[in-house]
Amino acid sequence: MALARSLAVAVVGIEGRLVEVEADLGRGLPGFTLIGLPDAALHEARDRVRAAVVNSRERWPDHKITVGLFPATLPKSGSGFDLAMAAAILGAAGAVPSGALASRILIGELALDGRLRPVRGVLPAVLAAVEAGLERIVVPVANAAEAALVPDAVIEPMHDLAGVLALLRGRPTAVLLPAGSAQPVDPGEPADPGQMMPDLADVAGQVRGRLAVEVAAAGGHHLFMLGPPGSGKSMLAERLPGLLPALDFRAALEVTAVHSVAGVLPVGRPLVTRPPFRNPHHSATPAALIGSGSPAIRPGLASQAHHGVLFLDESPEFGRSSLDALRQPLESGLIEVARARATTRFPARFLLVLAANPCPCSRARGPRDARCDCPSTVRRRYLARLSGPLLDRIDIQVQLNSPSRAELKADRGHATSSRTIAERVARARSAMEKRFAGTPWRRNSDVPGPAWRHRWPLLPEATRLADRAFDRGLLTARGLDRVFRVAWTIADLAEVERPGAAEVGLALDLRLPGWSA
């Protein structure tokens, strides 16, 4: 009887958990038994591992093989355990020194010919290994750049099982990647190097829309735009990520980990340094937005937009359940997906942008356009698909009209560029970070209402208009708090120390378009 152990990592959500892979060669008829809550892909690993070992010119043990994945109560999924299982089996057979297995994490899927294929979730797996005190991690070559992003990790990229076995036997063939050796991309580059980032100056005739987008970018405020087709709603939303500051290293690691687990990490670009942008079709289900899968739950589009923008165009066409599923992450910045066997949490602190036409026929250029045949009840029913509790969580709500020819002509060549606005946004963010030093908040949208009222109260003469709107029932208590936080962002953009009546009035206008005191 022989026993050997190797180490791997299971990724649950975007968190890695250390897994001990034990292989036992016992007496009895030759066979392969896998235990420890494996999924279907892991059960198929028995045939992949055997073929990879044989095709790597190694002798397959002619014994009763039992492989256990511990902790046994943790569900295991995916094919990333193949390499650790093969190494443990050969270690139990005496073909690999058992001491070499105890000092490394082994991650990778095995092809039938022994090649190492890339897997999802390598970044959170390497992070978990380093936190556990294990610095040497063997990964497929295709995952090497992603794995090398983790500080204090020594990555050993390998092409095939034969190379891994040579490494374990003391004949290293790997090119070691020291900690943090991966080079991030230039933060100013678009996702596609051949594609220019769109400029906000292209949206002519929409001074109000450009202002709303600038305020949303500066304070991280959610945005709802109501207007007819051709009014520039989609153009404004697509240019919003270009106004946001580049992600710092910690935020970039979080976003990269989510994209790695979701399997959408761009090839050759291991670190996501720009805020992501997700624009799902209106047929997207709640599972597509918040995450799904069994037993392994993958992050949905809302989590993939973490630290970026989630744009829902034609938002009333989305299912009511899909829209309401976003209410929890709008408040908490976290998505919790509960299943019978496990509960998984994904970060989802995104900037939500909703766009809607004023009616189903989409012919109205304004609130009372004669070309629109929709009765008022049809218009109200159409917009009522956006629930009140959801809209109450949207800080900025603007109504856009199709620009006239004169407005387009007057705005041409005079609209402010994205670069200039991004610089204003960066200065406003610096003012926020200075104000929130020593607190867990970084943006105005992060601060809860009670904290604003107790730590940064506004003068009564500044809040008079907002208080009047609240007394008339035009604002809820949550809506009143959101007006004040938008006013702080407007003040930060104007480099004013504290919002006054003008800033609160503008914030109120961006919340209740067309209202009258």
Image (cartoon, rainbow, N blue to C red):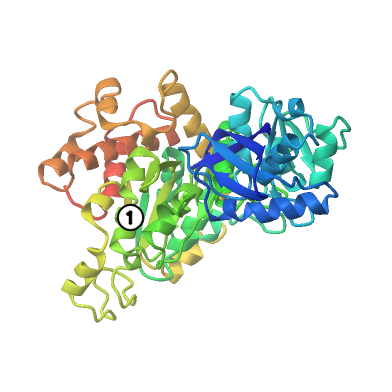
* Residue matched to label 1: 398
Residue 461 image offset from top left, x and y in percent: 20, 30
**x and y, in percent, of residue 435 in the image:** 42, 23
Q: Residue at x 24, y 31 (%)?
A: 462
Answer with left or right where residue 351 lies relative to residue 39: left
- Residue 339, x across and y down, in percent: 37, 48
Quadrant into which the N terminus falls: top right
Residue positioned 34% across, 50% down in the render: 326
| Vertical arrangement, residue 377 with respect to residue 95, above or below | below
The answer to which quarter of the image holds residue 101 is: top right
What amino acid is found at the position of numbered circle 1 in the picture? Answer: Val
Asked where in the image residue 151 lies, by quadrant, the reply is top right
Mark 1: few, some, or many residues within 10 Å (few <14, many ≥20)? some
Instruction: Give 455 or 255, whichever is nearer the viewer.
Output: 255
Residue at point 45%, 71% (across, down) = 405
User: Residue drawn 46% across and 61% down?
Assistant: 280
127 displayed left or right of 388: right
